[in-house]
Amino acid sequence: MAKGKLYTSEHLPDRALLVGLQIGSEDVLLPLEDSLEELALLAKTAGLNVVSQTTQHINTPNPKTLVGKGKVDEIKALAEELDAVVILFDDELHPRHQREMEEIFGEKRRVIDRTALILDIFAQHASTHEGALQVELAQYEYRLPRLTRAWTHLARQAGGGGGRSGGVGGVGLRGPGETQLESDRRQIGDRISQLKRELEKVRAHRGRYRAQRKRARVPVVAIVGYTNAGKSTLINAMTDSRVYVADKLFATLDPTTRKVKLPGGREALFTDTVGFIQKLPTALVEAFQATLEEIKDAELLLHVVDVTHPNVHAQAEAVLETLEDIGAEHVPILTVLNKIDRLEDPEAAQEALEDFEDAVAISALRGRGLDELLAAVGRKLYETLTPVEVLLPYEQGALIAAFHEQGQVELVEHTRKGVHMRGRLPGRLLARYKAFTSKPLPAAAEAD
């Protein structure tokens, strides 16, 4: 579990009041009511007891408190009436908004937002050293601009975050004339720098591991999808493994990789990644770069979609937007419509297939459609490897190495002009070799 957690289920009070805001006619993926319903599920996952919710539609945010003064008074009165000690906003709060409302609501009540809640859930579910580092970094980067006198002496409040390496949880000596607040800011800054250095080592290790896999020519398939879409259930069904599964948001956090047999005797590595969600905190996306590189470097993405969810299209769009944000929009996608066993109308699955391009309908829980899925994966992986023949000058060492590491080499000849190579390359690499391509392989050479 990550140290230095901003909020934990042990510290979060039980009773929470949800606050949703619709600003003007802003374009949102989920309607306000549906977004609040999702927030309630997040709160439940974090161990909160949601007692009520309130919403407001405004044209312009209040510069001090985000919501209007009348709504602030209403929230305060409602929280007092219901004895709600957590005021949970559905959108990320600006540090000023949070400070102003904390002062208005008093010390007995905590004002947190969706971002802080998701960070807490991630902290609870990070079971590996890498996951703990990533979550801790995201928490401190979120906390730093929000630091006030009420947040001082972080080691006692947050359980000694970073104490194992002399960071915020250490004793720490203040310089001449330095206030406790300034000391905390400096220590958090130092810890952030240290976490980034540690994660850079993790990133380098992952890079070497991926290069090793490429040399072994085992393609990688990354499983992505909205949280609770059934990704872990799917990897369990395909590999007979025991990845933790629960009917809650972000039940698993750390990536899991398993080898899967494909039709025709081929093999592929399937990696289960963290679930996406709308309004995914920017700090988390940045902190999880080491893990998200697994997605960017994959040969194929399996986009698992809960076909029974009322907001299925909005959830799918949120995943695609996140893939674009992390620079993975170039990787081929096969959509997996999961949970068809829950559809009352058997024909609904076929109708859903027509709504999504390049999709396969399955039930990971019941094992239905898995053969068709694996066959489609085999075809996709084969199709993404395009036959090429190139003459690479010797000074293009990076391209020569990439061909060996990320492609399938069938011929290598060293000539006076350079290295003559023939084989197959992932589609995303073709543009880099275009200037050196002599001719594509004939159709006969494409056969297995």
Image (cartoon, rainbow, N blue to C red):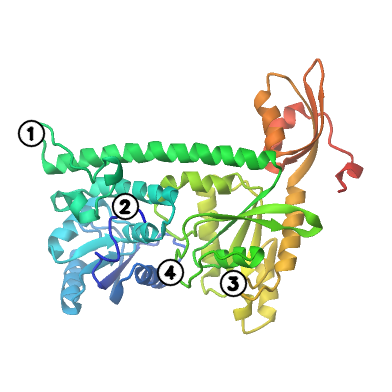
Mark 3 neighbour density, 10 Å: few (under 14) some (14–19) many (20 or more): many
Q: First in sequence, mark 2 or 4: give its number.
A: 2
Q: CA distance from mark 2 to mark 3?
A: 37 Å
Which mark lies nearer to you, 2 or 3? 2
Q: Amino acid at mark 2?
A: Lys
- Identify the mark at residue 3; answer none if there is no mark: 2
Q: Is residue 72 above or below residue 205?
A: below
Q: How far, Cα to Cα, is label 4 from label 1?
A: 50 Å
Q: Secondary structure at mark 1?
A: loop
Residue appearing at x 30%, y 66% in the figure? 9
Pick out the residue farthest to the right: 444
Question: Which of the two marks, 3 or 1, is nearer to us in this view?
Answer: 1
Give the percent coordinates (x, y) of residue 389: 81, 32
Question: Relative to 113, is 147 on the left or the right?
Answer: left
Q: Element type at marker 3?
A: loop
Q: Residues within 10 Å of mark 4 (few under 14, many from 20)?
A: few
Mark closer to the chain start, 2 or 3: 2
Mark 2 → mark 4, Cα distance in angstroms: 35 Å
Cα separation between marks 3 and 4? 18 Å
Disc 3 designates what residue?
307
Image coordinates of residue 368 in percent, x first then y, are: 69, 74
The amino acid on which the numbered mark 1 sits, given as a three-letter code, is Gly
Location of mark 1 (residue): 177
Pointer 3 with pointer 4, Cβ within 8 A: no
* Label 3 or label 4, whichever comes before in sequence order: 4
